[in-house]
Amino acid sequence: MDHVTSADGTTIAYVTQGAGPVLVLVNTSLDDHHGLDATAAALARDFTVVGYDRRGVGESGAGGPYAPEREVEDLAAVIQAVGGSAALAAGSGGCGLVLDAATALGDAVYGIYLFEPPFIIDDSRSPAPAGWVQQVESLVADDRRGDAIELFMTKLVGVPAEYIEQMKADPSWEHMAAHAHVLGHDGRILAGTQDGKPLPTDRWSVDQPAVVAVAEHSEPFFDAAAEALLAQLPRGRYESLPGLDHSAFWTAPDAIAASIVTALLTNASS
C-alpha cells in the first residue's frame, strides 16, 4: 500500500488498481478496504480504483481525538495523492462521509454513487436509539468489543436477538469486533440523519452528478431515504437494482460495478 499524510499529520494508507478515471471506494467503519476487494477488482476494468483504510483502521493511523471533519481531510489527501480529482462511491454507513466530502471538496469530486444511505427520516422503521454512539464507545473502552457489536446489530441494524449467537459463531464476528473502536465514527458522521425526522436541509450542498441506488429487496425505509436525499441533489438520479438486497454492495460485486459504471463513467469521460 501507498501512504499519504492527512492535514492533521495522520498517515492514511491506500492502494490503486486498474486504469481510467479515478474512483475512490469508501468502506464502512466495521471493515478495512479489503471488504470491497471484489467490487474494486470488477471496477478496475473501467476505472483507476482506489481503496483506502479509514483512520483508525488497517494500516492507517488513528490520529488524535476523533472528529468527522478529519475524515473529509483524509479523503482530500488521498484524492490529491492520486491526481486531484475522483468520484466517490460508498454503501450504507459510508454514504454520509461521501456526502460530506462532496460538499467540502467541490470540483475535486466529479461524481458520487451512494448505495442505500441508511437515513431514517420517517416512521418506516424505528429510529436509532438515543445515545447509542456513547454506549458503544463506553463498551469498547471497557474492552467489551463483542458487546458493542451486539448492541449495534440489535439496536441499529435490527438483527433479532435470537440470531446473535449464530453470528458469534462465524469468523466474521471477530473481524467486526476488531473494528468496534471505530463503530462510533459512522455514528457521529450520520448524527441527525437517523432520528425519524426529515433530513437537515443545510448540511450538504452537492452539485456534482449523483446516483442513489436502492436494491429491490431491501427494507422500505431505504427508498424513503433515497427520495428525501434526492430532493437535495440537483443532479441526482435514482436507480433500482433488481433482485438484490442491502448486502449487495459487498456480496454482488459484478452487479454493483455495472451500476457504478453506468452511473459515473459517462460523467468521468466528459
Image: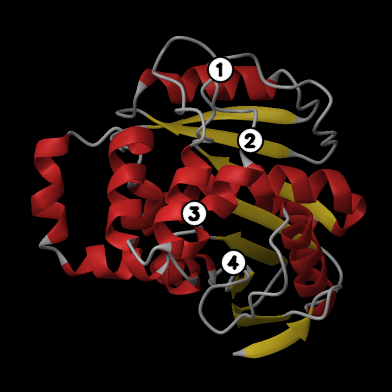
Going from the N terminus, do you reach mark 1 or mark 3 first?
Answer: 1
Q: Indicate the position of residue 169 as horizontal and vertical percent values.
A: 10, 62
Whichever of labels 4 and 1 marks the residue nearer the N terminus, that label is 4
Marks 4/1: CA distance? 35 Å
Q: Which residue is mark 2?
A: 191
Crowd band around label 4 with a 10 angstrom C-alpha radius: few (<14), some (14–19), many (20+): some
Amino acid type at circle 1 is Ile
> Do residues under tags 3 and 2 come within 8 Å of each other at their CB atoms?
no
Query: Mark 3 = which residue?
Result: 137
What residue is drawn where x is 49% and y is 36%?
A: 116
Which is more foreground, mark 3 or mark 2?
A: 3
Give the label, 4 or 1, closer to the camera.
1
Q: Is residue 188 above or below residue 24?
A: above
Query: How far across and how far down the image is residue 125, in percent?
Result: 39, 17
Q: Of the residues under marks 3 and 2, which one precedes in the sequence?
A: 3
Q: Earlier in the sequence, mark 2 or mark 1?
A: 1
Which residue is nearer to you in this view: 66 or 218? 66
The quadrant holding residue 203 is top right
Which residue is painted at 67% across and 23% down in the image?
A: 230
Q: Residue 168, position in %: x, y?
A: 15, 58
The amino acid beneath tag 3 is: Glu
Residue matched to label 1:
121
- Check disc 4 and report the residue beneath it: 46
Q: Is residue 135 left or right of residue 96?
A: left
